[in-house]
Amino acid sequence: MVQKSSLLLAGAILASSVTALDFGSCQPPQLTYDKTTSSYGTLAKSQYAGQSPSKTMKTITDYLCKTLEGSCDALTEANILCTNAASAAAKKTGQDAANAFNDVIKAGMSKTDSSPRPPPKKIFMSMTKDFVTFDGNIDPVWWFNNKIEVTNDACDETQHSMPGSRLIQFKCHGDVPGETVPAMRAVLNALATDQRFFKHFNKTETYCKVVSAQNGCAQMDSRVKYYTSFPRTMSMYAKSGTWDQGGLTFEITKSESAWDCMACKLAGAGMALTSIMAPYLEPIMAGAAVAVEISCATSGC
């Protein structure tokens, strides 16, 4: 059973152009006008049907746009379009006002929009339960910055040698060359500072300091040894609806032991992760909240 926890990341990854508006879980809003009652309303069988008709047009247009932004979870362009439609309707009355509102929505739906698109609705991340432990202090950020080699926003999938005869391989893709993968790498670098994902620890070990030919060891001593643990695999990808905006995965061969999926079980970890990631993400993020879902693979927790 996959265990999941919802986290929040501050910001948005990526910028690109769109050719169709995303109204979230709802259909495009429409304004109606009933001449018999001189009132404005919404389509009866739609996600906007919860508002009673009103003789005040602004009551209905405000309701349509607030519903679109709220429960519909529409993207920014759709919300802006609704606001523009309401402004156009406000200049007219009666059926002409309804037509003005609906015409702006229809025109926006068919128009190619070259403006920057909003952030992905969700970033999915997963990791397997097992991990790889290296002798010494290994800096994950160095590996991510130096071994994620990108050409045309796709990673070189060559396996790179790591300490202890291990190999690491990166795979990535993105829909905006020069932006998607660097943004994903920034998130990965931020996670590398979190002990729940990449763990630095030490152990005190005893050893024979002076060897004796008679009894094998004439003097024992102790020393501190340092270790670093990586998840054997970690992957993330960004999606907005059905739109695949990009992804980044790494895998290390020769795993050992069992990962306790600690990050998957921690309640309220979102704020902690946000504070850790924010300094890394601010240069590439636009400030909107993105839902992040972290899970351990089925073979994990």
Image (cartoon, grey):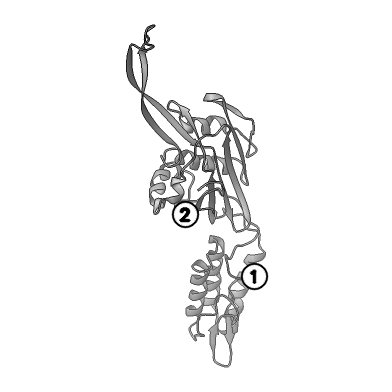
Circle 1 Cα neighbour tier, 10 Å, few/some/many (<14 / 14–19 / ≥20): some
Residue 240 picture quarter? bottom right
The residue most toward the top is 213
Q: Compared with residue 178, is residue 294 higher up or lower down, i.e. above or below?
A: below
Disc on res. 141 = none
Res 119 seen here: no
The residue most toward the front is 214
Disc on res. 106 = 1
Q: Which of marks 2 and 1 is nearer the N terminus?
A: 2
User: Looking at this view, is 208 or 91 the one in front?
Assistant: 208
Tell me the quarter of the image containing the N terminus: bottom right
Give the residue at mark 2. Answer: 5
Q: Compared with residue 16, is residue 87 higher up or lower down, i.e. above or below?
A: below
Query: Mark 1 falls on what kind of element?
Result: helix
Q: Where is residue 143 in the image (x, y as percent from the top left)?
A: 52, 31
Res 241 seen here: yes
The residue most toward the right is 110
Mark 2 vs mark 1, foreground winner is 2
Circle 2 Cα neighbour tier, 10 Å, few/some/many (<14 / 14–19 / ≥20): some
Q: Residue at x 41, y 48 (%)?
A: 274
Q: Position of residue 104 (x, y in %)?
A: 61, 70
Residue type pointed to by label 2: Ser
Contact, mark 2 vs mark 1 (Cβ under 8 Å): no
Question: Real-space Cα distance between discs 2 and 1?
Answer: 39 Å
Query: Mark 2 falls on what kind of element?
Result: strand
User: Looking at this view, is 13 or 96 the one in front?
Assistant: 13
Count of all numbered marks drawn on residues in the image: 2
User: Looking at this view, is 4 or 193 the one in front?
Assistant: 4
297 sits to left or right of 5: right
